[in-house]
Amino acid sequence: MSSLYAAGILGTGSFLPEKRLTNHDLEKIVETTDEWIHQRTGIRERRILEEGASALSMAKSAAKKALERSGITADALDLIIVATVTPDYLTPSMSCSVQAGIGAVNAAAFDINAACTGFIYALNVAQQYIANGAARHVLVVAVECLSRVTDWQDRKTCVLFGDGAGAAVLGRVEEGTGILASLVGADGTQGGVLTLPAFHMTDADRAVRSEGKTQVLWMDGSEVFAFAARIMSDSVRKVSEKAGLLVEDLNWIFPHQANMRILQNAQKRLKVPMDRIYSNLEQTGNISSASIPVCLDEAVEKGLLKKGDTLVLVAFGGGLTYGATAIRWTMD
Ligand code: ACO
């Protein structure tokens, strides 16, 4: 399908809570060690949202920063998409609350649930709104408060997750720049390996959770690992090819930050140097959908991205879902 307009990222933003939970802090909560966690995951600490604070507060901070960077005013937004599996409310949606919170009076708003792939899915949708002329400016926010759905008695999961938000403002860019290609996919038959119940629980869901715990995340880590190992490198290859890029020529790969061993595995399969694979996992843990936009904003702040650079964003997550976006960077 031909598109009328090229779409690209005009500004990025992010927010991480102040409070740090280190591996040594976790040693006092569950039977674990800093050494085990770091060796098996690459994580040293994660950020935790203060009690009483909302996911919305993180989403708004990230959104405002992205708007400021892009030079776009809130009333110029046509659409807001929020990716999250940990909204403050199911209704109103996070996106409607963000719309009110930043005064985006002209924007339509809806949420997307694609777990850790949420930001990639949201970019994919935003691009199409812009490409066909249905929207001029779209705000994409990914926000997660995983600490609130973590089973703090389950050492297999509680060491992995953190909280935070990332955002991007998208708009029209010069033809041949911005989002060059994207792909999204799912394998629902594997949905049971990573679950977070809402209003319905099966006996099987209860059986794997600590006594009395309902709305907590449960994961078969090795199954997710096997899926991630294959899908990360496949997706980078496929989206690069679709965009007419060679993997070895990519300036940066921004993978979902789930586990350092998954990133190393992808690096070996793709045969790219590790210093082209961005990672902040050690300080943030896994922030699900927010992990990629938080990394992007960090890279912008550090001055690592130059206009014309080629990037691939790639993620996998609950669902199971996966996706990737190839970008020719347009921000100065
Ligand atoms: N501290 C100490 N020991 C632990 C801990 C811990 N925190 N967690 C598990 N162990 C123990 C287990 O009980 C097990 O002991 P046993 O052999 O006596 O039963 C042993 O360590 C090995 O457990 P495994 O689960 O096989 O450990 P593994 O090396 O697979 O690491 C991990 C687990 C880190 C979860 C890994 O499977 C993984 O990273 N999987 C990928 C999943 C992922 O990253 N998901 C991200 C979230 S989902 C998403 O982003 C979409």
Image (cartoon, rainbow, N blue to C red):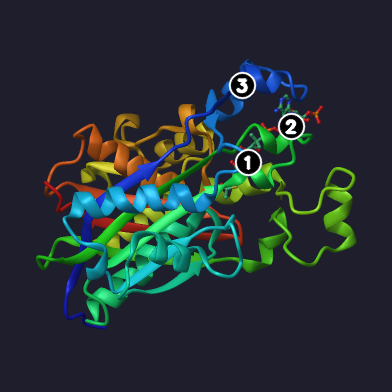
Mark sitting earlier along the chain (1/3): 3
Q: Nearer the viewer, residue 252 or 155?
A: 155
Is the residue indicated by label 3 positioned so its CB lies within 8 Å of ligand 1? no
The residue positioned 53% from the left and 34% from the top of the image is 285
Q: Are marks 2 and 1 in contact (CB under 8 Å)?
A: no
> What amino acid type is highlighted by mark number 1?
Ser
Q: Is residue 101 visible?
A: yes
Mark sitting earlier along the chain (2/1): 1
The spot of residue 28 in percent (x, y) is: 73, 18
How many marks on residues?
Answer: 3
Vertical order, 299 against 125 (above or below): above
> What amino acid type is highlighted by mark number 2?
Arg
How many angstroms separate mark 3 from mark 2 (CA)?
11 Å
The residue positioned 44% from the left and 54% from the top of the image is 142
How many angstroms separate mark 2 from mark 1 (CA)?
13 Å
Vertical order, 286 against 92 (above or below): above
Specify few, some or many for label 2: CA neighbours under 10 Å numbering under 14, 14-19, or 20 or more.
some
Residue 23: which disc? 3
The spot of residue 197 in percent (x, y) is: 74, 60
Residue 262: which disc? none
Front: mark 1 or 3: 1
Look at the numbered disc 1 and give the secondary structure of its residue: helix
Q: Which residue is mark 1?
A: 147
How many angstroms separate mark 1 from mark 3 (CA)?
14 Å
Q: Is residue 231 visible?
A: no
- Horizontal relation, residue 50 to residue 75: left or right: right
> What amino acid type is highlighted by mark number 3?
Asn
Residue 155: which disc? 2
The spot of residue 294 in percent (x, y) is: 38, 43
Is the residue indicated by label 2 positioned so its CB lies within 8 Å of ligand 1? yes
